[in-house]
Each structure stands twice: as structure tokens, then as C-alpha cells.
Amino acid sequence: MINALKQNWFSNIRGDLLAGIVVALALIPEAIAFSIIAGVDPKVGLYASFCIAVIIAFVGGRPGMISAATGAMALLMVTLVKEHGLQYLLAATLLTGVIQIAAGYLKLGGLMRFVSRSVVTGFVNALAILIFMAQLPELTNVTWHVYAMTAAGLGIIYLFPLVPVVGKLIPSPLVCIVGLTAVAMIVGLDIRTVGDMGELPDTLPIFLWPDVPLTLETLMIILPYSLGLAVVGLLESLMTATIVDDLTDTTSDRNRECKGQGIANIGSGLLGGMAGCAMIGQSIINVKSGGRTRLSTLTAGVFLLILVLVLDKWLVQIPMAALVAVMIMVSIGTFSWDSIRNLREHPLSTNIVMLVTVIVVVATHNLAFGVLAGVLLAALFFANKVGHYMLVTSELDEQTDTRRYTVVGQVFFSSSEKFLESFDFKEAVDNVVIDLSRAHFWDITAVGALDKAVIKFRREGADVEVIGLNEASATIVDRFGVHDKPEAVDQLMGGH
Amino acid sequence: MNQKGEANMLRVVACIDGSRAAPAVCDYAAWASRHMETPLMLLHVLDEERYPAEPDLAGSIGLGSREHLLDELADLDRQRSKLALEHGHHMLDEAEARVQKAGIAEVVKRQRHDNLTDSLLALEKETRLFVMGLHGESSSDRDIHIGSQLETVIRSVHRPILLVPDEFTQPKSAMLAFDGSETAFKGVEMVAASPVLKGMPLHLVMVGADTADRWEQLRKAEKMLAGLDVEITLAIRAGDVEPTLHAYQDEHDIDMLVMGAYGHSRIRQFLVGSTTTTMLKTAKKPLVILR
């Protein structure tokens, strides 16, 4: 118990505190930017980032992962905020949390195994594209000053780390924001600043029950949004958890993470924040900066609020161009550039799954739809491929006038047609033997196809004998119990 | 079980680390291996924490940051693990030389990455007895010494554990702490079945008031141990559990204290309860913990 506490919180204090501070500095512009995407005051995103980071530090299933207000979630709220206002968003946030906790108890975290690697890549790329696209309104119909500022900001972010010594000590996004704010204030540029985008926090977050009527009608308004938010939040969180797992060579508790995200969102909703989830970009920054335990996440949240409350006079002066530069960096860092290089090497079906995921997300602005499309497509491709793993051979015994068909491989909906086509019904023989002892029947389509074959042979006047049907159809039963018995799997793979 | 492949053979597993207890662990393990006629395995557990030495606080992520970061971190870990592996090899070689001098011809050496408890749990099935030092690697500032992990190990592992002090003395007699509870009788059963104490004079000691009831319980336990065919001494002493047991041990010059870590008896509290840490620290003679 004490060991676990030590391990989870205090095994890397210096690295965690430093990384937490670096993350907090990067979280502020993101939280403001995502609030603007969702169409709410920056304080909603900032409160959300604080609450979610602090709560998830205690209840999350992946130490060292950063959760806060995110772009993926913000994009789903746009119409709800536009049509019904902030209070409905807060109510939807609470409901999202409840759904996520339920998902955690139902152990839906395990469903992530159906999300293939190409879908994850597509998700990540689509997210990067969405974050980038969300910056475009800030870059259209503006003076050249904004372009110059954004370009300068990106220059600082990517070149400052190359400066010896200081470059590795001071976060470059911070240098970018401070530098550009100073320039804008000194020169007195008339460009849009954070202050123009809405209210910033001036107090600690306070407990608020969303001001919505508790009716079925309200539920019907927020439910579709909450479902989408819950799904997208869990998807991004679990994907990020996998990335952090890989980076740190440790494991995470997925179902605990689901419940944790739910609790964090409920907390956020009650304190006037929007829904959020784990952040891929920030989690990478955290690991890169040396953060590993829950302490880094907690530090990020607490430091964010302190900064916001201390610096509120200055935050309003930050030019939007500086935020846009930071967000473009996040988008570039989130995008999986390897996936473009891999397009040439990977099989076509994999590429199609990835691209369809991206296209559906960009078209619908909903990551859940993209993932759904990707998963379905991947499943179809898989069924198609496995369907090829079926072979029917035959030999004729002329003495007894018997045709013996031997079926090897997987018979199911995708291969049953091929299965039927493998029989020569027009051949006039007295006896037909169908040997299934090395085949596997996976569903009732396969059984139906076999019945059809048997009937057809009978109509042609042949006597049909089916061998090994019991063994072959053992796989039809849902949950046939081989998963925990190696010898049973062995038997199955060896053809009984 | 009697295959020559030895895959299913039970072993004495000696947990070697860089502490000053390591030589004693080797000696006791060699003794146990000979005494129980059980082959010996030397185990070194690499439970190094994997944290980067130099955090990069630039806070920016660019093209392929994730992929680069993964390569970088994996490379760091590889270098560190290589060093740790090599260090472990040396320790195991030293330990091997020592047990060979003590007359054990055949030794299996093994290294595992993981924390100590999980490593021992993974080896449990092929283990008859674990041998560990009472004091761990205290030279390191990181909290990885066996001493600090003892408690968790004792609670989780389901095999007898021999905890040894820094100096080796040939064990000649043993003492079993006994409280007459149902679980204590289970402990007696375990002693009767375990080869650890084979052929060693045994003291059966109860702590508490001297009553006829207690004597009866002791006699019953003695009968259960008849199969061991050793000299059994029975005793009842009044007083607090810990000092009384230690005093008895000193008085009769007993080499090994045998405990069952079972149930919620007084002896369990004495052993695994809050006094464990001090108890383990004050122990100067080897302890056998039966599960």
C-alpha cells in the first residue's frame, strides 16, 4: 500500500514537478483555444483543465498521462452551445461522466482491442487535422500582422530549443507567448487578443449545479451529445494511455481509466468546466519533460490554476496569433508523419482503413464516427482475408463410386459461398463423403451452406455422409471455451 | 516429476543482490540445498526504475516527436539494463563460486526483470524454499533493497522463506512459536511435512499462562510432529510475545526460529503485523517462514 503510494506519486519527484510545470504552461493556451472552438468563455476551458487534471491524477488508471479540456471534445459541443447555451453543456458534461463511469464498470475498456492500429493512426491524424482547421478562422480576414506574428511564433517554438543551455531549460511555447505578447503590447498592435474572446477566471472555481430543467426533454437534448463525448473521450484517453504505456514501458488499468475519466468529467461539470479527456500531445510533452507519475498530472493542474489566477491581467493581452502558433505546433506534433511514409509500404486495405477514418472524421467533425467507420471496415477486410483460408479438395474412389470432399479451414459468412462453389453437383456418383474434421464452422451461415450442399447432392441421387461435423461446429457456440486452455487451442489449430 | 529434464524439479531459490547479506544468503542456501537434497537456483532480480536522466523541458513537439521519443527512451533503457544485467552476472558468478566451494556442484543461475515480489511469485511453482537476506542493499539511495520489500514478499509468497542474517552459522536446532489456535496447528502440520527442519532438535514454545489446557495443546502438537523423529522440547513461558520468544531463543542457543505466517493469530500479529519491521530488524538468527 505504502509502496504503491510511493511508486505512484513520489518515485520521481523532481522530474514530475518540472514536467508538470512545463505541461501547465502549454495547457493554458490550449485550454483557451479549445474553449474558443467550443464557443464558450476561456474560463470554462481553464476550469475544466484544472479540475480534470487534478481529479484524474488521483483516480486515473494511467499515471503520467495528462487529461484536460481537449479539441476532440470541444468540436462535439459546438452545436449544443450554439443552440442551447452553456448550462446545457455543463449538464451534458455531467451525463458524459456518468456514461463513462458505467463504461468502466461494464469493462468496455477491453473493447479497445477491436480498434486496430490503422484506426488509431487515422484517429490521431484526423485529430491533428481538426486542431489545425480550428485555427483557420483566426487566420482568415486578418491583417498581415497576424501572419507575421504566427510565423514568428512558430519560428520561436521550433528554433528556441536549439539555443544552447537555455533552450533545454525554458519551454519554447512559453517563450513564444511571452515574446509575442510583449511585442504586441509595446508596438501597440491592433490585433485580436485572448481578452476579446470572452471571460477569464478571476476566482477559484465554485460549485455549480447546471441551471437546466430536470426533464425528459433536457435529457433528450443532451443525451446524443453526451454519448458522443463519452465515446470520443474514452477512445482518445485509451489510445493516449497505449502511447504512454509504450513510451514508459509500463502498463495501465484501462477500466480504471474509464471510470476516472467519468469522475473527472463530473467534477469538471460541477465546477463550471467543459468535458475533456486525455491529450496525446500534452502527454507526450509530459513524458519528454521527464514526468512519469501521478504527481506530474497533479502539478500540471494545480500550477495551471495558480498561473491563471496570478496572471489574469496579462493573459487577456496574449495575442491570438501566439495561441495559433502553439496550436499549430500541437497539431504538427500530434500528426503521425510516419503514417504518410508508411502508405507505400503498408497493404492497401490498411491504408484504406486509415484514410477512411481520417476522411469520415474531417467530414463529420466527430471522431466517434470515424473510429466506427474504421473499425467496421477493418473487420470487413479481416473477414474477407480469413475467408480465403478455406480449401476443398476431393478424390474419387472408382471402385465404390464415391467422391470424397475434404474441407480444410474457416467456413463462415464470408467463405460460405466459396464453400458451396467447391462442390461439383453435376458429377454423377453414388456416394458423396464430406469430411469436415479439419474445418471450422463459425456461424449458422456455414451450417446453412452445408445443409444446402447435402440437399443438392441428394437431389442428384447421391448418398451423402458428413464426417466430423460435431468437431467442426464446436466453434459456433459463442464463447466456446478455449481461451484459457492451451491444449484446446492446440487441438483446434491442429485440426482436432 | 522424475524426468531428467529437471523442468518440474523443485529448487531452493537464493535471492542474490549487492548487499552485505549476499555471502550469507549463498552459505545458507548451500546448506539448505544439501540439507534438503534439493537443487539450488541463484536468482538476481533487476527491478531498476526506468526514468530518464535528463528531462528535456523544451516543451515543444514537432515532426515525429512521438516516434523519436520512443526510440530515445528505449535506447536509454537498453543502455541501463545492459549495465544492470552485467552487474547481475558478476554477482551471480561470485555467488556461484561461493556455493560451489560449499560443495554444491550443480547450480542454476537466473535473472529476471520485475519487482522482487512478482519475480518470486513467478518462480513459486518450481520452488521449495526461498532464501533471502534480512537486510537489503542499503547502499543505494533508491528504495529497492530487499529489506524494505520483505513484508510484501512475506504476505504474497506461498512458499517457505528462509530469512538469514549477515553471518552464517550452521543451523543445529530450531524453535517453533505456537499459540494453540487452529491456524497454529496448521503451522505444526506444515513443519511436520516440510523437509527444512529435517533431523534438527525442535523446541515447541507457547507464550502465556501455564495452564493444563495449553499443555494439552502442546502435547497434541508434539504428537503431530512425531513423524519427524527428532528430539522435541516443550515449553510455556509467560510474558510479551516478542521479547519472550527472543529470550527463550538466546537461553537455549537456538539457531532457527520457525513461524507460520497464518491467520490472525497473535503470532501472526507478532510476525506480519505492525511489529514486523522492528522484528525483522532485531532478528540476529535465521527465520523460517512457512506458508
Image: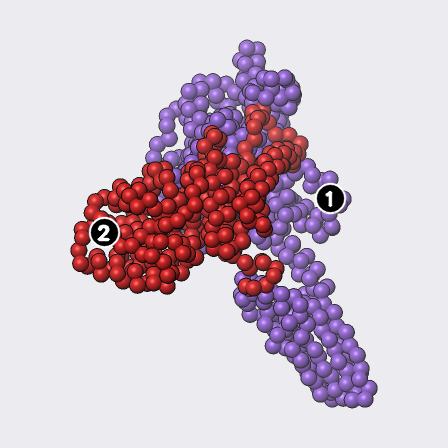
The amino acid pointed to by label 2 is Ile
- Residue named by callout 2: B236
Q: Which color was chain A given?
A: purple
Categorize mark 1 by other alpha carbons within 10 Å: few (<14), some (14-19), many (20+): some
Residue B263 appears left or right of B165 = left
Q: Position of residue B107 (x, y in %)?
A: 57, 49
Residue A451 in view, yes or no: yes
The quadrant holding residue B232 is bottom left
The quadrant holding residue A283 is top right
Find the distance from the CA under tag 1 to the CA under tag 2.
Answer: 80 Å
The residue located at (52%, 20%) in the rendering is A318
Chain shown red: that is B
Residue A461 appears left or right of B59 = right
User: SS at mark 2?
Assistant: strand
Q: Position of residue B51 (x, y in %)?
A: 54, 33
Q: Which one is nearer the viewer's eye here, A331 or A474?
A: A474
Q: Return the chain for callout 1.
A: A
Q: Which one is nearer the viewer's eye here, A351 or A464?
A: A464
Farthest residue, direction right: A398
Q: Return the chain for callout 2.
A: B
User: SS at mark 1?
Assistant: loop
Disc 1 versus disc 2: nearer the observer: 2
Residue A172 in view, yes or no: no
Categorize mark 2 by other alpha carbons within 10 Å: few (<14), some (14-19), many (20+): some
- The label number, if any, that marks residue A343 in the structure image: 1
Total numbered badges shown on the rendered structure: 2
Query: Compared with residue B183, is residue B270 higher up or lower down, i.e. above or below?
Result: above
